[in-house]
Amino acid sequence: MLSESSPKSKKIVTSSLTEVRVGKVQELLDLGIPPYATGFVPDLFSEEFRQRFGHMTTSDASGELVRMAGRIMALRILGKATFLRLSDASGDFQVYLARDTVGVETYKLVKKLDVGDIIGVEGHPFVTRSGELSLLTDKFTILTKSLRPLPEKWHGLTDVETRYRQRYLDLIVNRRSRDIVVIRSRIISYLRHFLTERNFLEVETPMMQAIPGGATAKPFETFHHALSRRLYLRVAPELYLKRLLVGGFVRVFEINRNFRNEGISTQHNPEFTMLEFYKAFSTYEDLMTMTEEMLSGLAYDIFGGFKFSYGETAVDLTPPWPRMTVREALLRYGGFRPEQIDDRNSVFIKAVETGLDVGKDDSLGKLWMALFDVAVEEKLWGPIFIHRYPVEVSPLARRNDEDPTVTDRFELYICGREMANAFTELTDPIDQRSRFEDQVQARVSGDEEAHFLDEDFLRALEYGMPPAAGEGIGIDRLVMLLTDSQSIREVILFPHMRPEKGSG
């Protein structure tokens, strides 16, 4: 039985790509059948359908009437009977349409159906001779007529640009892409629950900021006409979350969108998601332990254990994880001898020989990190905590008491990628002002990623911020790891792309 509403017939403009299907839309309208109906509500989706009726055999008969809906992914007309494969939010299921069951006139409408259409079906569960649970349909309703055909040979498609640009199409036909979306949601839910269980308060901070802070990055600029001022999309929420520590909150977190005006790669997208949290009366060593507990627990929640594969290599998140200083990592993986590592001229020569674009006045700490990025990072399969970063590249981190040239900061590396960045916070407003001023000088010298000086944040520190530690975890890279995805574009629903050819 089809919907009874009868819209007036309308003439529709056709194109070469959709001419046949648009013709069917017109035919439906002429018959008084809406090609874009509403009001059909399914009782259950395919996963529940299998759970409730998967025990049935070919000799069983169910008297229960079931209403389901889905997109047609396969259509096979066999004279007086038709088999359809429908896809819904939780999987797919088979539908059997027989002329004797739905009636001669209704069955004629099967020829108006196409792969890609969304229909509602009502009938009784049964098992075919081949042993497949199916729905013997008594009635069906056309809910949405698809004007564009789905790709015939989508599986194994190598045109990833099409998948990313037309993510809706990717999600229709690629079950793995849909699974990644579901796992991403599970990951974020787990992290949120982990923190709220430990009395962290979830907050929201501005995405448009007068002064972009919290990270060394080139920001996006915009303009607010009512305020008549330039604003920036945030590069990090850090300085606002620290203001909350000054205000008396001791445990806060935000799952946030950040924007950095940088290049696009398999690991970078200009718009990305971070988890950032701050815990008063803690140190970065405390956050190492907490991070181990959080991420190993997350892996267990997803996989039922601490071990899984990324690419062709095994990953084991069983805690505890090893720890190594930046200096130790350079000695082990960077090709340095102990007598070279602390000599600025030797490190500079090494950087030049490596082909790095370094400045003749760059400090030892900056040279260390330039070499670390190219010679060490990809070798850190991990999980491993790299800590004690140079002060020059850590403008917001507390100096180490034993060695004031480095900070109480760590980065977590897994599979050669930075997954988390954390440090014991700098609470000294005098030292913080000096670091900001160094960053301002670097910006004047041409460093577009150098930190801005934020007078209001300094004023907040002057009122007093409790000792604390803070951490940021890249959600997108974490999802990449836990879904065995090699590109960040696989785990972001709508990644930024270059303009399509011919789009102007």
Image (spheres, grey):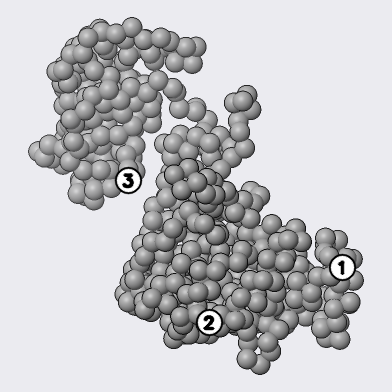
Mark 1 or 2, nearer chain start: 1
**Residue 71, quarter of the rendered image:** top left
The residue under label 2 is 427
Q: Label 2 sits on what residue type?
A: Thr
Q: Check contact, mark 1 vs mark 2: CB within 8 A.
A: no
Where does the image place residue 137, in percent across and percent down from the top left?
Answer: 20, 29
Q: Nearer the viewer, residue 168 or 137?
A: 168
The residue under label 3 is 90
Q: Check contact, mark 2 vs mark 3: CB within 8 A.
A: no
Mark 2 or 3, nearer chain start: 3
Q: Residue at x 34, y 71 (%)?
A: 201
Marks 2, 3: nearer the viewer: 2
Label 2, label 3: how many angstroms apart (C-alpha)?
A: 50 Å
Q: Secondary structure at mark 1?
A: loop
Instruction: Tell me the number on the disc at residue 360.
Output: 1
Q: Label 1 sits on what residue type?
A: Lys
Marks 3, 1: nearer the viewer: 1
